[in-house]
Structures are given as structure tokens and as C-alpha cells.
Image (spheres, coloured by chain):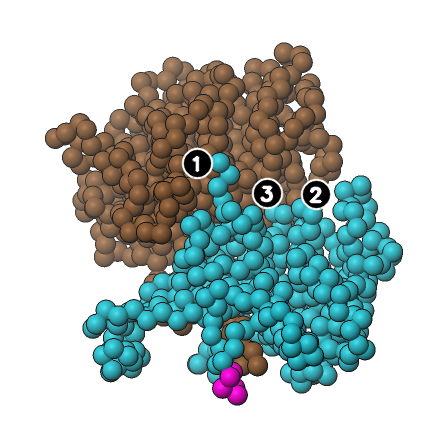
Chain colours: A cyan, B brown
Amino acid sequence: MGAAGSKLEKALGDQFPEGERYFGLENFGNTCYCNSVLQALYFCVPFREQLLDYYANNKSSGDAEDNLLTCLADLFTQISSQKKKTGVIAPKRFVQRLKKQNELFRSYMHQDAHEFLNFLLNELVDILEKEAQTAKNDAETSSPPEKIANGPKNALANGVHKEPLVTWVHKNFQGILTNETRCLRCETVTARDETFFDLSLDIEQNSSITSCLKNFSSTETLNAEDKFFCDKCCSLQEAQKRMKIKKAPQILVIHLKRFKYIEQLGRNKKLSYRVVFPLELKLINSVEDADAEYSLFAVVVHVGSGPNHGHYVSLVKSHNHWLFFDDENVEMIDESAVQTFFGSAQEYSSNTDHGYILFYERLGMNGSSKS
Amino acid sequence: MINTANGMMSTSSSSAAAAPGGNAPSPGLKTYFKSPEGRYKLHYEKGHPSGLMHYVQGKTVTQATVATIKDKPSPPTPPSQPSSSFSASSGVRSAAARLLGSGNGSRALSFVGGNGGSKSISGGSRLGPLGSNSSTSNLTSNFDGRGTYLIFNMGDGLFISDLNSQDKEPMKAIYFNNVYPVCHAFDSDAKDGHDLLIGLSTGDVYSVSLRQQLQDSGKKLVGAQHYNKDGSVNGSQNSSTHFPSSRRIIDKCRCTCISWVPGGDGAFVVAHADGNIYVYEKSKEGAGDSSFPAIKDPTQFSVAHARYSKSNPIARWHICQGSINGIAFSTDGTYLATVGRDGYLRVFDYSKEQLICGGKSYYGALLCCAWSNDGKYVLAGGEDDLVQIWSMVDRKVVAWGEGHNSWVSGVAFDSFWSSPNSDDSGDSVLYRFGSVGQDTQLLLWDLEMDEIVVPLRRPPGGSPTLSTGSQSSHWDNVTPVGTLQPAPSMRDIPKISPVVAHRVHTEPLSGLIFTTESVLTVCREGHIKVWIRPHIAEAQGASNPETALSTSLKDKPLLSSKVSNSSGYKQ
């Protein structure tokens, strides 16, 4: 505990942010995928605060069984209430619960950090919605849950049509994409909204996140084997399809598709491409006039040359300092060191630390105009 | 109950996988590219000595400077070009690398025939008629050094190549042992000997005579004036020499960019990663370092002068928070432009020490900037993948160049370009400029004044839902002197497209330089390609590329064969 912690404290000196805690997380055998994501989520301040708020307000309501939400809230509370400013914590209960919940994470194999984040956020939403449902059944008279304007319509399994609940997890991470398809025969545009918690982007060598996002939203022609069934023409037609960001999320999570199935190899391969990500980013969206402005606050980094082994670490920005979390270890880094995690311009390179999941936080809702 | 079943966590694009022009894993780079005026051909490739290995990869960023040494006694009428020193700069760089053995003398000569498109790279040891590189004699002191040279840094080395020689390896290497030269500048009109400036990762600055370096046979800098020893004026916390232990230690005081003041009588400025620019005069002492008061408000521009007029540096300009990534003087030295981590381009009246105008990038840091020869436009490029065209008349961004797929790391106007239709009408001035990026591409752009002088107030197809209240003020406001513009909105700025887009290297690029005969592209990892202009290539015809190049330089000091003969870099 002591050595690394005190070193960080020394490095920060009197700049150590008031009330903030920087704790490494113990590794229980290949749980770095979990630790790296947990650190990123912990330093996603609105998420942390809302989780702790929710937990504080709902703890009393019965001695409910442990679930991932309570385990996560416990862990975050444990970190934030430490007397010491730095140190190491063992996220034992959380990891046990995770393994119990999902057999995927039960083995000691190398796991995918993005799959874990995906699972965790959806699990949290599940739990919150179940709780809201129970609460609603308990007190039928209570006010209806908040509704999202123009939100996606979900046909539920039992056929009952309901507006989805908007939880604080949604409020942080959810964005809306419009999938626009224009039939090339009748010119009818079919638009379908989809919600997302993160954007998974295809990557190219020596490109930027800006360019990957542009490709993501670029127009694609559906033809040949891949025609579009136009409801108006009542037949398969050539069409143009594109994805537009309709509503930009508060927390923009970008997943770089670094693990790609290569047919010739018959297995996944890690793409070590150099993909530069700026510390600031803007998203054009169709709802607001101004472009949504973001600031990078966390990066989950995959270390290693292959998809089935390696290590995860994370870079986190907290109170304008960049920190490097590697399981138990926490150290301060210079902002300019973030660029060493972009990837390699050459396929075989000694640099195997590559940015994998990027977390951007939205800046002032009024967009960029400071005038 | 919820959308987990719908797999809504991740929405992925199926289109991007099929995106055209995706980078093939092992691309065949072409040795020419087409432009409206003809073919640019790869003429020479320059690189660091083959002994330098990959350990330095990604640790330093190579920059290049073209330097012309004129006749020693009284220079003949110099070519009409305004300045013989061009510097290609790039953005972010970190400082940490290790030197293995130096070059071991093995020559990896790779000559690219610029002689007709049919000739491809012929590796091996073919030597041009002038390239009798077998000479083992060291450079001698009566070597007058006349010629045009390429100066570039890589790792802890600074290398000098003869620009008009086919030799890939440099003729001269200077090593700094564990610290890194990161920027350099040359002044061909320097009055006394010192014409070359070198800025280091530690904040140290040297001025030397390039000719003297060429005359010396060693691997150390000779006859240098040393300024800002150990980055002393930048503050003490970085004075120790950080050495490779961790890539995460970065010198806050490292030099980022260096420039002579045009017509400044030996004055030069050095930009640093701490957001400061220091002004020096080479006639003054280097040793008695000045000290400056603490910066009161780090968010505000301020200038402090040294208390004693005899010591260097003579002034400190605090520009911004975070690193200054690039600086550029207008040709006549009136204005100084800076770009930095905070994303702002700033233009200062240099002699008045006053902020004139400036503005924010679309987003992210700006990495490079350059002036048009007439001082009317400033280019800036950075982390939003855009080339920004800033008008000094309008004091705002008048167009964005869209075409790079990654950060823009180098921009330059082609001041040797003459518009094909400049004869018929004087009105439509056409500017040609180039940009390079971390996407390994060189883009060339034409800027037609008619396109942007009357900007589109509201581009067609703008959102109809816009209320008049939210109409952008970008084009309507008159900008008072000394104010910085906020980031423009995407829809307010006209876009232009490149006339040429060519992948020139396999590595991300860091800079480009236009010379009378060629375009030079510089990659981060120390490779430089010389692309000869179409009319020069045509003039060569089928004749030998080396001699043809020399003859095309008739208005320049002729590169004597003696120089080429005796200047082989040999250990």
C-alpha cells in the first residue's frame, strides 16, 4: 500500500484534490479488464455521484439481496470514504458477484473490457428497472416514471407496449442514432431510431477518431445481395443508408474495434493501428443547433499483441491531472503521455499499449459558443 | 423487459468496414503523384544513418529545415526568394529515447530514379556520375560549404544531408547524448557566423555556424553559443536531465519551435511546452541568464523584459496555458503567429508586442501554422483534422480544408507556385498550399479568392428549424483588435477540397517544405522524401536526373561537383 500511495501523494503535493481518493484495485487473477473499467467509471463523476445518491436513498428499502448495483455502489462508497488519500482496495465482493452472475467472466481467461462494460451497464439498467417496477406495483398511485421524448419504442416480450424507463444510467450514457434509409427507386426515406450506450467504431491504420466517426456516419449503398425492402415499393430495392447521431449522450463511450475476426486466420486478431484521439471532440447531431462538445476523461488501454491475452490499464483525468491506473498501482502522468497510447504505425512494433475504450464527457449544454 | 435483449448496448456500423480507400496492410507507395500542373516525381529519399534503430520510435518527432549556404565573402545577389530557410514543424512530441551505437558506416544507398516513370526504385549501390562516394577523406577546413542542405533531427542526433545529392544517408551527424534536438532554424542572411539555431528537449538552445559544423569531422556540435542552460529560465523543476526511465516524464520546458526574426538583426525566438516564448539576441551574452517575474495570470498574454539589457533572453512572452506547438513569422517579420495545446491560433504584432487577432480550432489542439507570402492568410492545422484558413483582413477563419483522415501536422503555402491564369486577370489571385497529416497523406490545395471572399452567410441546406435568434454571428460581427474568436460552428465555414491527395509515406508525417524545385515531405520517424516539381522534371527530359537538377538551378549558387565529391558521409 504505502510506497506507491505516498509517492502519488508527494507528486500531487498540495494540489491533491480535496475529498478525492486515488485507490488501486487488487487483481484476482486476470481481473484487470474489470479493474480498468471500474476506474474509468469511478472517475466518471456524474455517474459516481448518481450511483452513490441512489444507493444512499434506496439502501433502507428492505434488506434486498446483493446485486451488481449494490456491489458496485459498495465498492465506490468504500473507495470514497477511505481515510487515506491513496492506497489499494480489493474489489472482492464485486468480482465475486460478477462471476456468479455471468459465467462468461467466471474463468480465469483473458476477458474483453468492452464486453464487461456492456454487460455491467445493461445489468445496472435491468436492476433499476426491476426495482422501479416493484415500486410501481407496490404503490400503483405513484407518479409515472419519466419519459423520454421521441424515445425508442420497445416492443416487450409479452406484447405489452410500454414507454421505457429512463434511469440515471440512461441519462448518463444513452444517445440516440437515426438509421436513415432512402429507397433509390421511390426516394422514400425510412428513419428508425436506435438507442446506444456506446459507439463501436471500425478503425483504419493512421486515422483519427474524427475520421472513424465520419466513416461511421457515411452513406452506404445497399445493393446486389444486400438490397433493402422498401415498404412503399413492396419489393427489394437499392437504397442508401446512413447513421446519424440524433441525440448526443452526456457520456460518450467510444469502443475501437481492435479485435477483428480474420477469415484467413480463422481467429481474432488484434489491430494495433495508430488511431489518434483528441482530448476534445465534437459531435454533430440532428437535434441541437450547436455541435455537442466533449472532453476526454478516461481511456481503457489494452496492452499486448494478441486478442486472447494481455493486460488492461486505464488513464483517467481527475481535477485536471492525468493518472495511470494499473491494477494496484496508481501514478501521475503528464497529459502529453496520453499520445503514447494511440497505437503503432507499423504492424510489428514494441509499443503494444493501445487505447481501446474512450470516455468523453459532455461540456456545457449550450454547446461551444462562448460569445 | 428492456432493451438488453435488443442488443442496444453497441451499435456498430457495417458501412465503415466496406469504406473505400481503407489502408491496405502493406501498401505500395507510388513514386509519383499527379497534379493539375503535371506529375511530381520522387527524386530523392533522405534518412538517418542506418545504424540508428527503432528504439527511438515514437519518442521524438523529426522536423526538417532547408538551409542554403551562400558564398563566403560577399554573397552574390541571392535568389529572389524571400527567405532561404524553410522549416517544417510538427505538433506534439515527447522526449525520451536512448542511443544505441551510432552509425556503423554501412551504407544503405537507395537511389530512386526520377528519370521517367518506368524506372522504379533501384536499390543497391548504383552511384550517380557525381556520387563518387568512395572518398574517405574527412571534410577539410577549406571546404567552403556552399550548397543547399537538409537539416533534420531524429533521436538524439541532428543530421545534415546535401539536398542535391542522391545519398540517402546524411553527410554529417551531430549527437547530443541523451538529450534530444527537437527544432531548428536557419538564416541564410546571418551577418556573422552563427546561422543555425537548435532547440533541445531540455529547453537548452544553441546557435552555431552551419559551415563550421560541415568543416568539422567530429560528431559534436562545435563553436556553439549556449543559451538557457538546462532550461534555467523556464523554472527549476525540470532542470535535471530526464532520461529514458519512463516515457511518462515529459519536460515542461522543452523547446517546441524555434525561429529567427526576419530582418531582426540576429534576434530569434524560442517557443516552449510551458506556453512561453523567449526572445534572444545572438549579439548578447548567452551565459548570464536573465530571470523573469512569476506569471501573474497564466490565462492571459503578457510580456516581461529582462531587467539587464546585456543578458539573454531579453524577453519572455507568456502566450497561453499548455504547450505552444508551432510558431511562424510573416515574411516581413511584422507578425508572429502561434498555435498551441489550447486550440487557439494567435497573431501578434511582433514589434509592438501586441495581440492582434486569433481564434479557436473547431476542436482540439492546433499543431502547425504558416503564412502566405503576402501576409494576408495564415494556415493552421491540428487535431480536428482540418486545415484552417485564417484571413488577416477579416480576422476570422474564412475556409476549412477537409480531406485529412487524421491530425494535420504540417502546413505551408507554396510561394513558388504561379497561378496558371494569373496572366489574363489580376483579380482572381490563386494561392497554392499544401498540408501533411498523421494519415501519411500529402494534400495540395488551391485557394480561389472568389470562392471565399464572399462567404456563404447561410450555406444552402442549412437546418430549416433554425430560429433567426440562433443565427451565427461568425460572419456578421466586426472583430475588434486583440480579441480571440470562439470555435466556429461546422455549418458556418465554407469547406474546400484538395486538388491532390497522395499517400507519401508509411509513417505519420510531421512536416512539409516547398522549395523552388521540389516539395519535401517529412515523416515523424526521420524519413524525408524530395518530390520534384513537374516543370523541373520535364526540363530534365530523359537526361540524367542529377545533372538536370543542377542545371535547373542556374539562378542559384551552382552546386559544384567538388562538393558532392568530397562530402560523402563516411565514418
Decide: is B10 above or below B339.
below
Query: Mark number for residue B242?
Result: 2
Picture quadrant where residue B321 is located: top right
- Pointer 3: what residue? B156
**Residue B369 shows which numbered tag?**
1
* Residue sitting at the far bottom: A158
Q: Which chain does tag 1 point to? A: B
| N-term-proximal mark, 3 vs 2 | 3
Q: What residue type is labelled 3?
A: Asp
Q: Nearer the viewer, mark 2 or mark 1?
A: 1
Give how far across and how far down residue A265 sits, in percent. 47, 81
- Is disc 3 placed on a helix, strand or loop? loop
- Residue A164 shows which numbered tag? none
Quarter residue B563 falls in: top left
Q: Mark 1 or mark 2, which is nearer the start of the sequence?
A: 2
Looking at the image, do the residues carrying marks 2 and 1 touch, with CB atoms under 8 Å apart? Answer: no
Q: Can residue A339 be seen in this view?
A: no
Q: Residue at x 44, y 49 (%)?
A: A290
